[in-house]
Image (cartoon, helix red, strand yellow):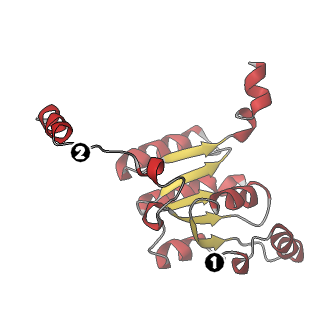
Amino acid sequence: QTLANFHLARDAGLTIVPRHVLGAGFQAPSDKVNVAVVGYAHGMGTSNLKNIVKSDNIVALCDVDESAAAKEARVRSKTTPADFPKPPAEYKDYRVMLDKQKDIDAVVVATPDHMHALVAMQAMSLGKHVYVQKPMTRTIAEARALTEAARKYKVVTQMGNQGHSEEGLRLMQ
């Protein structure tokens, strides 16, 4: 049936071309993912945030660190809500963020290590796709629970381990 449809389309002179070929790199707003970043004031959270904003929508930011150092780090790295084209909502508690903010498609978890599994599990249970910085979990049991949750809730998950994906390290192998 599918092959017949293909030949019908071909014989009718129809050609399906991916939009990126015709759009010269244009990304439609409907193709963008609405992302929340938990733990963005320092480290990899800041780095992830700055990369995600290049291609997707940052709709929520969450960080518990209200110290002067964290505030200065946000200003210096240009990751305050005012630095974005459309300022994202700001939260101190990821549970409140996930409860209130219904437009989140995916969550980046870059909190201190002991919180990774908790935040990821909560997000997955709500059908959110999750990117977790390493280490993904503290225990094997937590890792197994997240694996089962990803299957159960049918979400895409990934653990960040950028140190092994850099060009120099790949060339050494």
Q: Residue at x 82, y 67 (%)?
A: 77
Considering the numbered disc 2 on the image, is that residue within a helix, a strand or a loop? Answer: loop
Residue 7, image x and y in percent?
16, 34
Q: Position of residue 140 (x, y in %)?
A: 57, 38
Q: Categorize mark 2 by other alpha carbons within 10 Å: few (<14), some (14-19), many (20+).
A: few
Residues packed near mark 1 inside 10 Å, few (<14), some (14 to 19) or many (20 plus)? some
Q: Residue furthest top?
A: 173
Residue 67 location (% of width, % of height): 85, 76
Which residue is at a point 49% across and 76% down the rendered structure image?
101
Q: Position of residue 88 (x, y in %)?
A: 61, 77
Q: Amino acid at mark 1?
A: Tyr
Residue shown at 68%/40% (left/top)? 161
Residue 107 lies, with reference to residue 133, above or below; the image says below
Q: Amino acid at mark 2?
A: Leu
Q: Which residue is mark 2?
A: 14
Q: Distance between the Cα atoms at labels 2 and 1?
A: 49 Å
Residue 54 visible in image: yes
- In front: 84, or 22? 22
Mark 2 vs mark 1: give the one in front.
Answer: 2
List the residue tagged with mark 1: 91
Residue 148 higher or lower than 3, as above or below: below
Q: Secondary structure under badge 1?
A: strand
